[in-house]
Image (cartoon, coloured by chain):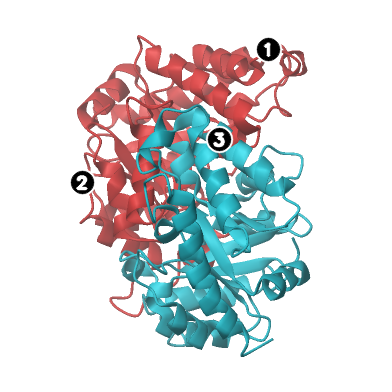
Chain colours: A cyan, B red
Amino acid sequence: MNRQQLIDTIRTKKSFLCVGLDTDIKKMPQHLQGETDAIFKFNKAIIDATLPYAVAYKPNLAFYEAAGIEGLVQLKKTMDYLNGLDDKVFTIADAKRGDIGNTSQQYAKAFLDPAGDFNFDSMTIAPYMGEDSVTPFTVYDGKWVILLALTSNKGAFDFQFIKTEYDDCNLFEKVLQKSQQWGTPDNMMYVVGATKANMLTTVRNIVPNSFLLVPGVGAQGGSLAEVCKYGLNKDCGLLVNSSRGIIYASNGEDFAQRAAEEAQKLQLQMAEELKKIF
Amino acid sequence: MNRQQLIDTIRTKKSFLCVGLDTDIKKMPQHLQGETDAIFKFNKAIIDATLPYAVAYKPNLAFYEAAGIEGLVQLKKTMDYLNGLDDKVFTIADAKRGDIGNTSQQYAKAFLDPAGDFNFDSMTIAPYMGEDSVTPFTVYDGKWVILLALTSNKGAFDFQFIKTEYDDCNLFEKVLQKSQQWGTPDNMMYVVGATKANMLTTVRNIVPNSFLLVPGVGAQGGSLAEVCKYGLNKDCGLLVNSSRGIIYASNGEDFAQRAAEEAQKLQLQMAEELKKIF
């Protein structure tokens, strides 16, 4: 899905909600746990229920890998289902990969290649290893790198805010600046945590036109209003993710309906925010 | 495998060689390519041939993921084989993972849990997300985090050498310093690229007792003699990796024998170096 298609989807659905499919078999409703394809069945129910309210889905690969090879089979089924929807959505492999050039090429092939098992639209990438670890993810047409800039966790303060010697900027600002040479707003987004919404002004000064993937709304405590205040640009420019707040809203038989309700709550707020720009 | 067992293995084999199993189906010998379980068969032949000369094996996950779910099946077969050897070896998931705490827990479960599909001894982790992204990998008994400090690629210069404002140190030095609080030389190693061997003096000043995983000897141009000069400590303290230089030494029917020859060449140099300390 390219930039214009993403913006059109956001306009049409009046939403920039991304649903994080951090599917943990231990946290899913009891009645599903014994079934075959339990992870896929859970994901499908969540997707079907939240589809009117969401423009993107983000499986976090850790949760599938933790279930072993069978977990990856469930991820493939989920991706086949998402890629087959008439109502097109943007898909994100939350993988946080990155390695030397020839190895990053292999990761790109694994997750972005249309001929591969997964065929995601985008994947999250860690910046520590620099340019040649990132650029292999920009070569697939209509596919995206989502580079970690400022993450939503406590550990973000360990390195991302380190002041660098020159030009009084933090490491995460350096990442934003330098990576401008590696991609464009058509193939590169950034992760900026909602728990640090006040930093979005700094981020927007460096990358005014880029889409930002914003995790941390909900369970991690970030505020949607704050994120919009500092993060919205003329094309929206935001994908706001909620994972646990939606997919584990209930662990009873009503889990999908409750997920839909939580997704709709966020979508309604988003529709209000979008009135300011569209 | 714990620290003492690793040191004992190094002493016994007179080697600190790690063989990188970056197995790319396109680069393996023609005669294997059409076969079922081709990746595993290739790996098994390489392992059998190099086992007298190597103490560690490091599958790079990107290459398996690039082959889709079937690639992960081949990785599992490889790990079952490695874990079943009488001649115990140290295994490294070259995965370069790292995410917020609850997600890193899932990655740790995926690759380190003895009850999981893979049961590696260790895995490589990217430091950008800080403490809570790293510590979940230190909780399994006798298992290790291998944290990226200074990588062997060109992109290492983009951020790892950034001078930080305080105490005149680079980002990679900050990573080494700060992470001392997150683990010990019994459960944490560091990646330090052989292409930057002269920086090993700086590294050793900060982490005198830690094991270092050193990639980049061979195909990437690093020198074993230089690495030993600056990196050896009283317990050896090094695992030196060679991937392409060994596993693709030939792509003919003699590939395993040629791999053994290349591994032995390195082992003989290592044995000489070890005479200086043991």
Q: Quickly name the residue at label 1.
A: B254
When the figure is inspected, residue A270 is found, relative to residue B50, above or below; the finding is: below
Q: Quickly name the residue at label 2.
A: B184
What label does residue A74 carry, if any? 3
Provide residue A123's location: percent of width, then percent of height.
60, 55
Q: Is residue A131 left or right of residue B133?
A: right
Q: CA distance from mark 1 to mark 2?
A: 42 Å
Q: What is the count of numbered marks?
A: 3
Residue B254 visible to the viewer: yes
User: In terms of secondary structure, where does tag 2 sit?
Assistant: loop
Q: Earlier in the sequence, mark 1 or mark 2?
A: 2
Same chain, labels 2 and 3? no
Q: What amino acid is labelled 3 in the image?
A: Gln
Q: What amino acid is labelled 2 in the image?
A: Thr
When the figure is inspected, residue A129 is found, relative to residue B258, above or below; the finding is: below
Q: What amino acid is labelled 1 in the image?
A: Asp
When the figure is inspected, residue B150 is found, relative to residue B139, above or below; the finding is: below
Provide residue A80's location: percent of width, then percent of height.
68, 41
Q: Quadrant of residue B146?
A: top left
User: In terms of secondary structure, where does tag 3 sit?
Assistant: helix
